[in-house]
Image (cartoon, rainbow, N blue to C red):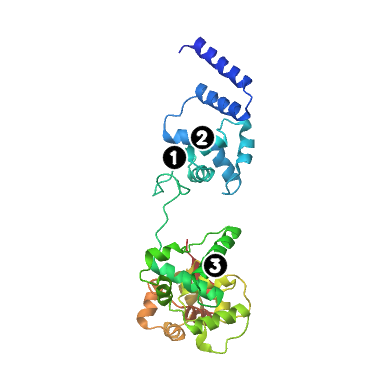
């Protein structure tokens, strides 16, 4: 088509736009005309950028939050960008369009790695790591300690939803298996009873949990959480809104709240040990470690319990969090 014919075609389309009575039809025709007379993107990345560049800018401006459709349509009036109706029809839902725009690079390409294929609300997002039985057991134990009793399936469902809601309000994320994971990882005639057996929640642990929840002292010293692995103790302290030292009974002050991702940091431990000048033998005796466990602790192959961590921190004149680092 030569230039005079193109001009006549453009004039004809603009005449249709002027005669259109539907605002939606007017917007769609205008967008189609702009894409016709402008350079056509040649690669998938360029086409994706042409469609989602404004949406990506709005998501960045809102610190990762997905903008509502009416806000997007208000911003696109003076920008060469498709309507929200077009994006919804193309991607299947507004959530999918936003999730793809959020992951998209500045040039329109997508980062490497596994992503969900096909449609659905997870399209364009990274493929999450599959849950393990250990993670499921840890979540059930955390639920039990948060409630002060052995949970039922209904208890776990409600606690799961509430924990996720609180995480969203804080702008963080949590990795807690949903109840459907039980049916995938646990087998037998009574899956929930089998899972509780795996969790091995003791009456003494529940006694300590109830005491912590009520803010009362624990009469039975054997009921303390000192035997908990550090990973589990960090999650529990964060769930209950206190620090590792508070959970261990080392202080009555709850703050600062522990990060659930806290893990033992051998580098921080070495630095404090060398600064204070404590002999290795004193350290082993204070934490009840064997020589082999002490060596593995420095190589990050031995996972200390909460009790061992606070014993080390007390010996070095530090807080439990001083000997930890936050994992991603």
Residue hosting label 3: 159
Q: Which residue: 44% across, 40% down? A: 109
In terms of depth relative to the viewer, which is nearer, 228 or 298? Answer: 228
Q: Which residue: 61% across, 47% down? A: 62
Please tell me whether mark 3 sits on a helix, a strand or a loop. helix
Q: Residue furthest front?
A: 189
Q: Residue 267's image quarter?
A: bottom left
Disc number for residue 109: 1
Disc number for residue 51: 2
- In the rendered image, residue 214, in percent from the top left (x then y), is placed at 62, 80
- In the rendered image, residue 60, in percent from the top left (x then y), is placed at 57, 45
Q: Whole-Å distance between the Cαs marked 1 and 3? A: 39 Å
Q: Is residue 20 above or below residue 259?
A: above
Callout 3: few (<14), some (14-19), or many (20+) C-alpha neighbours within 10 Å? some
Q: Are marks 1 and 3 in contact (CB under 8 Å)?
A: no
In terms of depth relative to the viewer, which is nearer, 83 or 39? Answer: 83
Q: Is residue 119 above or below residue 260?
A: above
Q: Earlier in the sequence, mark 1 or mark 2?
A: 2
Q: Whole-Å distance between the Cαs marked 1 and 2? A: 12 Å
- In the rendered image, residue 181, in percent from the top left (x then y), is placed at 42, 63
Callout 2: few (<14), some (14-19), or many (20+) C-alpha neighbours within 10 Å? many
- In the rendered image, residue 180, in percent from the top left (x then y), is placed at 44, 62
Please tell me whether mark 1 sits on a helix, a strand or a loop. loop
Q: Is residue 222 above or below residue 309?
A: below
Q: Earlier in the sequence, mark 1 or mark 3?
A: 1
Q: Are marks 1 and 2 in contact (CB under 8 Å)?
A: no
Q: Quadrant of the N terminus?
A: top left
Q: Are marks 2 and 3 in contact (CB under 8 Å)?
A: no
Q: Residue 166's image quarter?
A: bottom right
């Amino acid at each position: 088509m030569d230039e005079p014919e193109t001009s006549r075609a453009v004039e004809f389309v603009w005449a249709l736009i002027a005669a259109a009575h539907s605002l939606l039809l007017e917007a769609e025709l205008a967008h189609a005309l702009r894409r016709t007379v402008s350079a056509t993107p040649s690669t998938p990345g360029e086409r994706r950028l042409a469609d989602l560049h404004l949406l990506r800018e709005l998501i960045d401006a809102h610190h990762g939050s997905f903008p509502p459709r009416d806000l997007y349509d208000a911003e696109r009036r003076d920008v060469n960008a498709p309507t929200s109706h077009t994006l919804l029809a193309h991607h299947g839902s507004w959530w999918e369009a936003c999730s793809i725009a959020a992951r998209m690079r500045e040039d329109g390409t997508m980062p490497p790695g596994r992503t969900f294929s096909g449609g659905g609300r997870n399209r364009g997002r990274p493929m999450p790591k599959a849950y393990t039985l250990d993670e499921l057991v840890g979540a059930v134990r955390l639920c039990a300690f948060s409630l002060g009793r052995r949970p039922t399936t209904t208890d776990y469902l409600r606690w799961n939803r509430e924990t996720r809601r609180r995480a969203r309000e804080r702008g963080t994320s949590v990795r807690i298996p949903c109840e459907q994971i039980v049916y995938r990882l646990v087998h037998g005639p009574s899956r929930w009873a089998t899972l509780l057996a795996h969790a091995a929640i003791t009456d003494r642990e529940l006694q300590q949990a109830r005491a912590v929840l009520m803010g009362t002292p624990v009469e039975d010293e054997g009921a303390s959480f000192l035997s908990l692995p550090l990973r589990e103790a960090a999650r529990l302290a964060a769930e209950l809104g206190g620090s590792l030292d508070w959970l261990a009974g080392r202080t009555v002050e709850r703050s600062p709240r522990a990060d659930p991702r806290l893990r033992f940091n051998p580098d921080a431990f070495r630095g404090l040990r060398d600064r204070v000048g404590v002999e290795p033998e004193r350290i082993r005796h204070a934490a009840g470690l064997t020589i082999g466990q002490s060596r593995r602790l420095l190589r990050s192959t031995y996972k200390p319990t909460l009790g061992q961590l606070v014993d080390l921190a007390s010996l070095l004149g530090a807080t439990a969090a001083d000997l930890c680092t936050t994992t991603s």
